[in-house]
Amino acid sequence: MNDERFPGLHRRGFLAATTGAATALALTGCGGSGEKATSDGAPRRGGRLRAAFAGGGASETLDPHLASLFADAARAKALFDKLADYGADLSARPRLAERWEPNKTLDRWQVTLRKAVFHDGKPVTAEDVLYSYRRIADPKQAFRAKASLEPIDLDASRATGERSIEFVLKRPTAEFPNVLASFGAYVVPENATEFDDRPIGSGPFRFVSFAPGRSAVFRRFDDHWDGAPLLDEIEFVVAGEESARVNALLGGQVEYAHELNPTTARAHEGGGQIEIVRLRNSAMQAFCMKTDRAPFDDERVREAFFLIADRQELVDGALSGAGEIGNDLFGKGYEYYAADLPQRTQDLDRARALLKQAGAENLKVTLDTSAVAAGFTEAAGIFRDQAAKAGVTIDVKMGSKDSYWSDILDGGTLCCYRSGAMPVEAHISQRLLTDSTTNATKWRHKDFDALYQQAQSTRDRTERAAVYGRMQRRLYTEGGFLVWGFADWIIGTSRSLKGVETKAPANTLDWARFDRVWLA
C-alpha cells in the first residue's frame, strides 16, 4: 500500500466505549453470517478483502493482549482465538472452549478445550491457556484483560489434562464464562513474547506481513477449528480520517470501511453506491449524576432529571437519529436487561414538583462535556435547553479531550458519558459496586453489593435473572445514570462484499467477522 491512496493518516480511532479513565468495549455466537443470508447469493471462495480502519500510527502492535483500538481488535480476532466470546445479546458463547462446568459452589470451573491447532501445526493446550492468562495478569504489564481476569486465582488454577483446565476462583462467580470472553483475553502459544514479526495464533487467518500504521496482510488458515475462511486473504488498511475511509470505499480501493458518521450513512443509504450497515445498540449514551454530592445526593433531584430529558430529541439532535432511545438502564437488548420496565418520557410538571419538594427550585448545575466523543457537545446543548423549561439552569463546561475521562471520574457533579457493549453483569461489577474502579456515579450501597454477590452465587439462570431485575429496578428508580439513548455503530461496504453480520453490536464476535464474509 502507498499512502497516497489513503490521505490524512494519523492517530485516530480509539475504542468507542469509554468508561471513566479507561476505554472499554467488551467483545457472538458460534457460526457466522457467511453461510446464511440467502439474499446475498451463494458464498464464493477466493479473493482479497481490503478493510479500512482508523489506526494508531507507528506504535501499532499485533500483540493481542495490548489491543486498544478497533483495528487492533479486528486484527487480533483474525489471528487469534479466545476461550469464549460474546453473542449479539452479550451472553458468552464457547469458542476455543468446547464446554465449561462449575462445581456446586461456583468457585471452581472445569473448562475443556476443543481440538484446535496453531498456525505452526502445534495443538492448542491447557498450558497455552494458562500461560496466556498469566501473561495478561503480570503485575508489571498493562494488558487490557488484566482486570477482567482478576477473579481467577492463577496460582491455584492448573491443567488437568492436555485439553482440560481447572480454574480456581477467588469467590463464587456464576458469570465466569464472561471472564473467558473478556476483551483482549486471547490465547497465544506458551512462551510467546514477540508478535510483530511473525505472530502465531490459532485464528482463521495466518500472518503474511505487517507495517505498523499502514497495513497488515493475513492469509486463510485452512486448518482452523471452525472451518477455513472463504477469503484467500485480508488486508487491514489504516486510514485515520473518516473521509479517507469513505473515499477509499467509493473509489474501489477498499471493500469495507469501519466507523462512519451518520451524515455519511444518510447520504449513501438506500440504493447508493455503497452499502450501509448499522450495528444497533453498540454504544450507551448518558448523563452521569454523582449521587454522593449535592444536588444529586437527593434522589428526588435525580428523578426530576430523568423526567426533564426528551430522549427522542436527544437521539435526533445529538446522534443525527442514528440510534434509539434509552430508559436509564445499560444494555438494551442484552442478556438480563430489564425490558419490562415502562419507558420513561418527559414530564416537566412532575420534574418541577420534585425539585420544589427537594428545595431545589431555580437549581443551577454545571454539565461537563467535551468533543472527546461524537454527540457529546450536541447532547449537552440540547439537555441545557430542555432543563431550562423545568426552571433548571445548566452551565455547559467544555473539557479537554485528552483528560476528560479521568477528570469526570471523580470531579464535577454532572457529565456526558458513554459506553460500548459489555454484559449487564460486567457493567454492574465495573461501575456500580462500592469498590468499582470506574464508579462514575459514586453509587455505593452495601445492600446493592450484596445483591450482586447473591446473583453471582446463584446457579439457576432464571433465579439469577430475577436478582438482576431487582437491581435494575432500583437503578431505574434512583440510580445516577440518565441513559437517554443507544447509538448505532456504522460501517460501509462495497456492494460486492457479502455475509457481513448486521445484528452484532460493535466488538462482539460477529463484528468484523471476516472469516465468514465473501466477495461476490
Image (cartoon, helix red, strand yellow):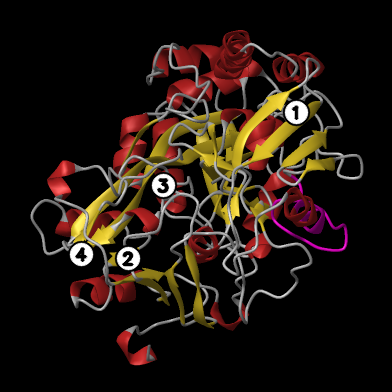
Query: What label does residue 231 carry, if any?
Result: 2
Callout 1 touching callout 2 (CB < 8 Å): no
| Image position of 217 with respect to 89: above or below | below
> How far apart in space, not on screen, are marks 1 and 3 (Cα)?
30 Å
Amino acid carrying label 2: it is Leu
The residue beneath circle 1 is 433
Q: Residue at x 48, y 49 (%)?
A: 507
Query: What label does residue 510 carry, if any?
Result: 3
Amino acid carrying label 3: it is Asp
In this view, the residue in front, 122 or 67, is 122
Which secondary structure lies at badge 2?
loop
> How far apart in space, not on screen, are marks 3 and 2 (Cα)?
16 Å
> How far apart in space, not on screen, are marks 1 and 2 (Cα)?
45 Å
First-in-chain label (4 vs 1): 1
The residue beneath circle 4 is 494
- Residue 281 figure quarter: top left
